[in-house]
Image: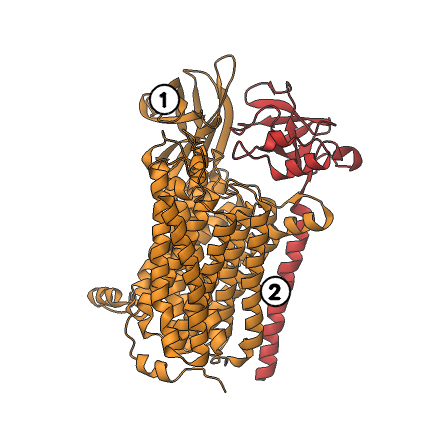
Amino acid sequence: MVETGHFALVLAFALALVQALVPLFGARTGNSRMMAVGGPVAVIGFALTVLSFATLATAYASSDFSVANVWENSHSLQPLIYKITGTWGNHEGSMLLWVLILTFFGALVAVFGGNLPATLRANVLAVQGAIGATFFLFILTTSNPFIRMNPAPIEGRDLNPILQDLGLAIHPPLLYLGYVGFSICFSFSVAALIEGRIDASWARWVRPWALVAWMFLTGGIAMGSYWAYYELGWGGFWFWDPVENASFMPWLAGTALLHSAIVMEKRSALKIWTLLLAILTFSLSLLGTFLVRSGVLTSVHAFATDPTRGVFILSMLTLFIGGSLALFALRASRLTAGGLFHPISREGALILNNLFLTTATATVLIGTLYPLALEAITGDKISVGAPFFNLTFGPLMVPLLVVVPFGPLLAWKRGDLLAVAQRLMAAFAAALLAVLVTALFIDGASAFAALGVGLAFWLICGALTDLAVKSGFGTVAPDVMLSRLVGLPRSVFGTALAHFGLGLTTLGIVGTLCFGTEKILSIRVGETVELSGQTLRFEGLYPSQGPNYSEDRGRFALLGADGSSTSEITSAKRLYPVRQMTTTESGIKTIGFSQLYLSLGDQATDGSVVVRLWWKPLVTLIWGGGLVMMAGAAMSLMDRRLRVGAPSRRRKATGAVPAASLP
Amino acid sequence: MTRKQKRLSVIVAGLAFLGAATGLTFYALGQKASYFYMPADLTTTSVQPGQRIRLGGLVEKGTIQRGQGATVGFSVTDTQKSVKVMYTGILPDLFREEQGVITEGAFGPDGVFVADSVLAKHDENYMPKEVADGLKAKGVWQESKSE
């Protein structure tokens, strides 16, 4: 019964209003019973949202076409997995998933926030409640997924075939866990501004939340990239599409936040900056939601355009971003600044990281919003694509990547650059070797490509150097070194892993962009084609029938050195009859870290087919590096010091005496 | 240097960095952004051969020609004017006659538009936004076509 879900959603909205107002008022007046309301209300609100989401998912799983949303986006012949993932493969359902994750994080704060100062906890939950209430209102008024149809149609209109893929089960939930995870950092920042103070428990809480959100966002972006790569059949892993930028901007800002939070936690410096970054990161998440959901952009994500939604989201954006920044402007001066340090130090390196990352975020923001602004002002329509971002984003990233290995090796407060450079000699030698090998032994390698490979090896070896130095490699006996290595804090491993993953991604990007080859040709049955040493023979087109589509499978044999077939690649043209929509299923063969990618085109009257073939060297490292970065974040989270709710030695002190109190 | 001078030099360096980044960004916007035109716009604006633009409109009925290998020719129209486009590659799955399309590329010296990318819709219900707006502005938008 979807009415149950609808009712639960209305109740959840009412509870979110209570959660937004009562604890806030309690915190202002010092009423501890009112402050205590926030926790249980957040948990019940989450339970109601789960109920609401579950009823919609059930309607999808059971193909209840009397629900308009199910009718528009599902079909009885779809495999069960796509019926269920179809729940969020549309505007209304995906907003419900968004708010489900928001209430989930709110409930986590309520459950695990027992050791937070009562007023901070109350204010955090109130801000979460306010965000939740707005989104509930948005869903209920403009995007209600529970509307019935009478009479009920017999058959549904099918889910967009592009979305009928396992990617839909993974990409949106991961991405939303990332986007919405930053709401906790946002709520903590706004709560700190409301209270006018940042204490030590604030810092201990924000960093793990930023890590969790960052980890999921990394996974969501990597998965989205791989999905677009294999599903759209264009063979690219990143298009600088505004929708991609919408998820990339919070990632860049979130990465900066992650690093500045380290300084704040370890050295009590950069407090105000960290707080501002936390606000900006979630603001960019909201902006991303606006760009994707309001229909101002054309993309696969713009499920439907409805002007009232755009206006609503824009007002919401103004309220939260404008409100939090105004609060920041009013209150930031009350927060005391932190300790001093020398420019050449770990703090200095992290500030450099922040300078580059925030500037890069701004570049992406300008490139994404400028066309919208220009069209609104002059009516000119322009598109800003890869050439723009290569020219602006590239020059910002290269110097940043060059300095990455230095950061973790520098000491806090005052570092010795020369000593660090000496420790990195081995990594530098390895990078130089990689440059020389690439330039001398790989045909057609440009200087740019060789330097790119060198940069990737510099990052990879730099990350290993960090672990080697910290475990005393070369200065102590091997068994001592091993026990030191095992005894290193998990966060040191996390840093090394994340930087190692960054190196892998860089290597993958350089490999694919600089050494990739492609061919477009028309081919007949029995003919062979050769690309970068791989030979394929076209075996023919074979019709086949899926549960809700029919397809022509083009079969290609991958030939070994002796001309015999070693394996097969198939690429298909699928027709989904309900929507009369054709899709291309690309054929991919992974060889080592590289991939042979084949995309089937149209069939000509003479029986030949057009085929586009790519050789993509090291391409899997792009996403593999993302997974390693996620593992780094997970490793860092396992650090006892950071574990959410872990008892702290300073806990007693922080509850009573704020580290930075009001004058 | 005194502490004040040090702080000042750090701030100056930071501002110089931001200034350089801003300058580069706006230079890149001027150089690397490609403008969107409909065929009829090309009579009023001069587009040099070789200048990258995005050309959008409907694929004119009966103009799709498959040439040698993977090269395809077709005309893009806004019902007032049409422009001949050549493209080598695989056309998007939703590329059809009388459907909205955006091509990106540049005019050759012979006046034929050589596209290196062709975008159609991601979903059969929607037309590329630029094309829909352009057609609306020219008064040839048919609501029935877009739903």
| Residue linked to disc 2 | B17
In the image, residue A338 above or below residue A630 = below
Q: What chain does mark 1 sit on?
A: A
At x 34%, y 33%, the residue is A79
At x 54%, y 77%, the residue is A331
Q: Position of residue A347 (x, y in %)?
A: 46, 72
Q: Amino acid at mark 2?
A: Phe
Q: How many numbered marks have been drawn onto this rendered protein structure?
A: 2
Q: Residue furthest bottom?
A: A663
Q: Image quadrant of residue A592?
A: top left
Q: Residues within 10 Å of mark 2 (few under 14, many from 20)?
A: some
- B104 or A307, which lies in front? A307
Q: Image quadrant of residue A578?
A: top left
At x 64%, y 39%, the residue is B130
Is residue A645 found left or right of A439 in the rendered image?
left
Q: Position of residue A51 (x, y in %)?
A: 34, 51
Chain A tint as drawn: orange
Q: Residues within 10 Å of mark 1 (few under 14, many from 20)?
A: few
- The answer to whether marks 1 and 2 sit on the same chain is no
Chain B tint as drawn: red
Q: Quadrant of the N terminus of chain A?
A: top left
Is residue B67 found left or right of A24 in the rendered image?
right
